[in-house]
Amino acid sequence: SQKIEQNSEALNIQEGKTATLTCNYTNYSPAYLQWYRQDPGRGPVFLLLIRENEKEKRKERLKVTFDTTLKQSLFHITASQPADSATYLCALDNSGNTPLVFGKGTRLSVIA
Amino acid sequence: NAGVMQNPRHLVRRRGQEARLRCSPMKGHSHVYWYRQLPEEGLKFMVYLQKENIIDESGMPKERFSAEFPKEGPSILRIQQVVRGDSAAYFCASSPRLTGGTEAFFGQGTRLTVV
């Protein structure tokens, strides 16, 4: 059966360090993979999209990798700040055939 | 350009009542998606609509739940005869086309509590 797993429910890191979040999937062949941020009581907000033929995508302090062989995406936040504390969701995008399918998310806490 | 608007933000219903959740997509967006989120759970897809058409309702329970997106006005998610298990946050998202390399824009959600 199809499955999306984000590495851990919660991740605590020290301010200034790099946070690395993992998204693994099975029995999917997404053409794209998207990452969203969700704050408590709010709707998800889009961060980054990466295509299956792209190895890496960057946006300011954010970096996403996509390995279709390993069926894995890594999401990095460099020089993390307490304001980066939120839940981060990965979403599989099957190139227009179906709506986005989300993982459960990883709750990141950046400690000052 | 206002974002995706959902109302009400909070809704309390007694068991057996009907709940109506509204979603106005971003201007120019004709694709609307509804998701449900339980505490500590991810977003679960319910239904995908385009104007006046249900495209994919594979995630929506067969009974008591219905959705529409009329030619004029917001999309409505209707839950009849609510039960305690329906308590959740319901999010609506819109996009200018079916997500195929396109981001989805989410509303702030409606938190339904069934008492």
Image (cartoon, rainbow, N blue to C red):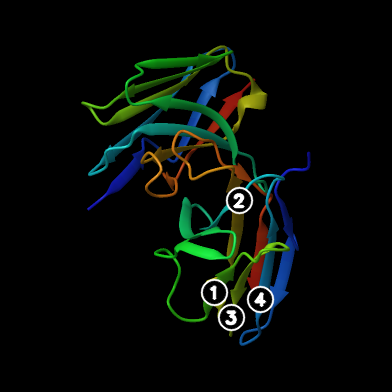
Q: Are marks 3 and 4 in contact (CB under 8 Å)?
A: yes
Of circles 4 and 1, the one toward us is 1
Going by the numbered disc 4, the residue's amino acid type is Ala
Going by the numbered disc 2, the residue's amino acid type is Ser
Which residue, given by chain and number where applicable, does mark 2 sit on? B30
Of circles 4 and 2, the one toward us is 2
Which residue, given by chain and number where applicable, does mark 3 sit on? B82
Chain letter for the residue marked with disc 4 in the picture: B
Residue at mark 3 shares a chain with residue at mark 2: yes
Label 4, label 2: how far apart the Cα atoms are: 24 Å
Q: Which quadrant of the rendered structure holds the C terminus of chain A?
A: top right
Say whether disc 4 or disc 1 marks the residue closer to the N-terminus: 4
Task: Return the residue nearer the eye: A74 or A48.
Answer: A48
Say whether disc 3 or disc 4 marks the residue closer to the N-terminus: 4
Label 3, label 2: how far apart the Cα atoms are: 29 Å
Which residue, given by chain and number where applicable, does mark 1 sit on? B66
Say whether disc 4 or disc 2 marks the residue closer to the N-terminus: 4
Q: Residue shown at 39%/64% (left/top)?
A: B58
Determine crowd level at label 1: few under 14, some 14-19, many 20+ residues with C-alpha closer than 10 A.
some
Label 1, label 2: how far apart the Cα atoms are: 19 Å
Which residue, given by chain and number where applicable, does mark 4 sit on? B19
Image height check: is A100 above or below B6? above
Residue A69 is situated, as x and y percent measured from the top left of the image, at 21, 26
Label 3, label 1: how far apart the Cα atoms are: 12 Å
Say whether disc 3 or disc 2 marks the residue closer to the N-terminus: 2
Residue B110 is situated, as x and y percent measured from the top left of the image, at 67, 60
The answer to which quarter of the image holds residue B114 is bottom right
Q: Residue shown at 41%/43% (left/top)?
A: A96
Label 3, label 4: how far apart the Cα atoms are: 7 Å
Q: Can residue B95 be spotted in the picture?
A: yes
